[in-house]
Amino acid sequence: SHIGLFAVIICRRDSNDRVVESLEVVTLSNDVPVKKFADQNKLPVHVWPLGDLQGRFDVGVVVSFGCLLREGLINQFPCGILNVHPSLLPRWRGPAPVFHTILHGDTITGVSIMQIRPKRFDVGPILHQEIYQVPDNFTADQLGATLAAKGAQLLIDTLRTLPERITNRREQAQDGTFDATPKISTSMSWIVWEEQTCVQIDRLFRAIASRVIRQTSHVQLVVIVLMTGRGRIPVPGSMSYQKESNTLAVCCKDGWVGFKAVMLKKRLSAADFYNGYLHQSFQNRSGPPNWTFIQVL
């Protein structure tokens, strides 16, 4: 969801260390964290859309704003409108760059400060970039929080030398190679055991854990713990309870992944699921159980 931050700023032009002389905040609604922060810090707040700002501010800044900006509004700021984007543009343009960074296993990402172009997202010239190496096993939430802090500092650094940054701005590639990434949707959370590997399922969990509950054709599964099962692999989708680690093991394309909980009508631990469903099925059936009877849509 968009946090809806549009800051309008007057930059100081004297020799003192202070960068911002005046700051006002624009939000898409009154029900966003940015509005609460602005109220707590006594910052003037405006709800979108904006009226005439001609001559009042030097530069605008948008972060996860989610609205296309018209040329007339951008031109009201002598230094234009900047965007803080959590990727190394032009890679991962669009509304979910951190999600796609984790999902695709990128080891390097970063933050970009760019100028907004009218009626298009994430295609404007780059003013400043900083590279960041993605730690192993980072979730999208952890990466997002880290890049947010780095982005704030990079924005201040950019504002300190804004005229020079604008003069030396670098245009992005416009050859269509880096099209905008899609928004996060529930459909992205479906696991197809026959097609997805241990690594892919692990990345999916770390990318989408706090946004969309993972789903499969059998059950909704949460809290993935990657396992190292090797050797002969049974039919993908087969389940086994590992008592020693209290983990529900599910076979996927190239091995096993382990789950600490299963979401049916309520959240069940792996042990509860085994005792209530898996153990009973193995007692009453010969061969692998058919789990479609506990399908959750």
Image (cartoon, helix red, strand yellow):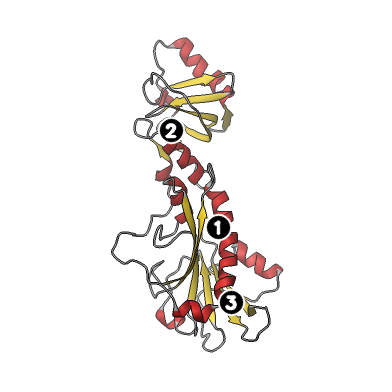
Compute the Cα span from label 1 to label 2.
27 Å
Disc 1 marks a residue whose amino acid type is: Leu
**Residue at the spot of label 3:** 160
Asked if 269 appears above or below 243 in the picture, the reply is: below
Asked if 264 appears above or below 168 in the picture, the reply is: above
Q: Where is residue 245 drawn, in percent x and y?
A: 59, 23
Q: Residue at horizontal 53%, vertical 85%?
A: 53
Q: Where is residue 206 drawn, in percent x and y?
A: 51, 43
Asked if 113 appears above or below 139 in the picture, the reply is: below
**Residue at the spot of label 1:** 147
Whether residue 99 can be seen here: no
Considering depth in this image, is 66 or 170 the residue closer to the camera? Answer: 170
- The disc, 3 or 1, on the residue closer to the chain's N-terminal end is 1
**Residue at the spot of label 2:** 198
Disc 2 marks a residue whose amino acid type is: Cys
Q: Secondary structure at mark 1?
A: helix
Mark 1, residues whose alpha carbon is within 10 Å: few (<14), some, or many (≥20)? many
Tell me whether the residue at label 1 lies in contact with that at label 2, contact meaning CB atoms closer than 8 angstroms: no
Identify the image quadrant of the C terminus.
top left
Front tag of 3 and 2: 3
Compute the Cα span from label 3 to label 1.
20 Å
Q: Where is residue 72 drawn, in percent x and y?
A: 42, 83
Q: Secondary structure at mark 2?
A: helix
Give residue 285's mark: none
Disc 3 marks a residue whose amino acid type is: Arg
Q: Is residue 111 left or right of residue 236?
A: right
Considering depth in this image, is 35 or 85 the residue closer to the camera? Answer: 85
Asked if 232 appears above or below 80 in the picture, the reply is: above
Tell me whether the residue at label 3 lies in contact with that at label 2, contact meaning CB atoms closer than 8 angstroms: no
Q: Secondary structure at mark 3?
A: helix
- The disc, 1 or 2, on the residue closer to the chain's N-terminal end is 1
Displayed quadrant of residue 149: bottom right
